């Protein structure tokens, strides 16, 4: 049986386009397969902190963050977030920027590495994105992350222990360093089978075509 | 005789890979950069963020 196409995804939790991109990529995979693509895909998520200077307990809303830290005018931010909310809805996603708890995502990334080691990364990624954008959960605190991890079948006590110890901190940093080595300065970013780089929440057809091309390359070199 | 103590060797230094992929797709596809997630063709958040950080 052929090896699956490898998909390396750099993304953050606090990244509206990453959640949208996740849905569009999944649809791209579906279209690739409907069109006859017969290779499976193996997705691995890599860490990228969009705002590493964000405090864990940021006091304010998403609007406050962008106004204070990015010096954007409040009306422009509100308009941008309204548009993003509407756009996400067209992808079947529910965003609540008014109640979202903006936070540092370092520990969430450490958790994703732990989840990868336990074969639960996909479930954990999906759970964290929904917790952040839809449920306004605090994904910067270890106790909250441990609760979410337990929901996808991870050992809550182990999660607390490993996150408090910072066991996966170096793995997170290695991902970020790799992103910089690749020249990635925005997310989501996809590397398909090590051959094709795809930046942003592209249309499903773009992803489907890139997958098909990568699969064809495999056949041509086998 | 006492056995010599050896350090655990589970930690390895990752080797950074240089870009070896070809960029494909729409160059204007939306991304989040430096905490700002602009919507192409709508609000130009990058222009608004040009002033940099206050913190």
Image (spheres, rainbow, N blue to C red):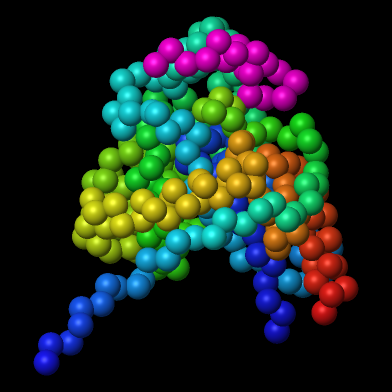
Return the residue found at the far left.
B1
Determine whether A173 is above or below A159 in the image. Answer: above
Q: Is residue A21 visible?
A: no
Determine whether B51 is above or below A206 in the image. Answer: above
Q: Nearer the viewer, residue B55 or A201?
A: B55
Q: Residue A200 location in percent, x, y?
A: 68, 39
- Quarter of the image for the N terminus of chain A: give it: bottom right
Q: Residue at x 31, y 20 (%)?
A: A59
Q: Residue at x 73, y 35 (%)?
A: B29
Q: Residue at x 68, y 46 (%)?
A: A24
- Quarter of the image for the C terminus of chain A: give it: bottom right
Determine whether A189 is above or below A213 in the image. Answer: above
Q: Nearer the viewer, residue A91 or A149?
A: A149
Q: Residue A82 location in percent, x, y?
A: 57, 20
Q: Which residues are magenta?
A: B38-55
Q: Residue A70 location in percent, x, y?
A: 50, 16
Q: Quadrant of residue A154?
A: bottom left
Return the residue found at the far right.
A220
Residue B40 shown in magenta: yes
Return the residue found at the far bottom.
B1
Q: Residue at x 73, y 56 (%)?
A: B20
Residue B42 shown in magenta: yes
Judged left or right of residue A149, residue A126 is right
Return the residue found at the far front.
B1
Q: Is residue A213 visible?
A: yes
Q: Nearer the viewer, residue A64 or A32?
A: A64
Determine whether A142 is above or below A196 in the image. Answer: above
């Amino acid at each position: 049986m052929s090896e699956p196409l490898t998909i390396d995804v750099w993304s953050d939790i606090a990244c509206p386009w990453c959640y949208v991109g996740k849905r569009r990529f999944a649809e791209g995979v579906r279209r690739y397969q409907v069109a006859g693509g017969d290779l499976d895909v193996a997705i691995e998520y890599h860490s990228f902190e969009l705002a590493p200077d964000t405090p864990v307990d940021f006091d304010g809303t998403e609007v406050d963050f962008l106004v204070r830290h990015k010096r954007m005018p409040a009306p422009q931010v509100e308009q941008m977030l309204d548009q993003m909310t509407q756009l996400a809805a067209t992808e079947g996603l529910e965003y609540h920027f008014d109640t979202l708890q903006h936070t540092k995502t370092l520990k969430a990334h450490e958790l994703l590495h732990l989840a990868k080691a336990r074969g639960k990364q996909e479930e954990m990624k999906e759970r964290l994105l929904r917790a952040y954008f839809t449920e306004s959960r605090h994904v910067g605190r270890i106790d909250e992350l441990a609760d979410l991890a337990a929901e996808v079948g991870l050992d809550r006590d182990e999660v607390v222990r490993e996150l408090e110890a910072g066991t996966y901190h170096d793995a997170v940093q290695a991902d970020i360093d790799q992103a910089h080595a690749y020249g990635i300065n925005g997310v989501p970013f996809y590397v398909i089978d090590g051959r094709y780089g795809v930046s942003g929440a592209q249309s499903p057809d773009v992803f489907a075509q890139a997958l098909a091309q990568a699969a064809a390359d495999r056949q041509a070199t086998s | 005789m006492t056995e010599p103590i050896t350090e655990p060797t589970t930690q390895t230094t990752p080797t950074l890979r240089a870009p070896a992929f070809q960029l494909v797709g729409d160059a204007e596809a939306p991304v989040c950069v430096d905490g700002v997630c602009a919507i192409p063709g709508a609000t130009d958040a990058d222009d608004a963020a040009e002033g940099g950080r206050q913190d």
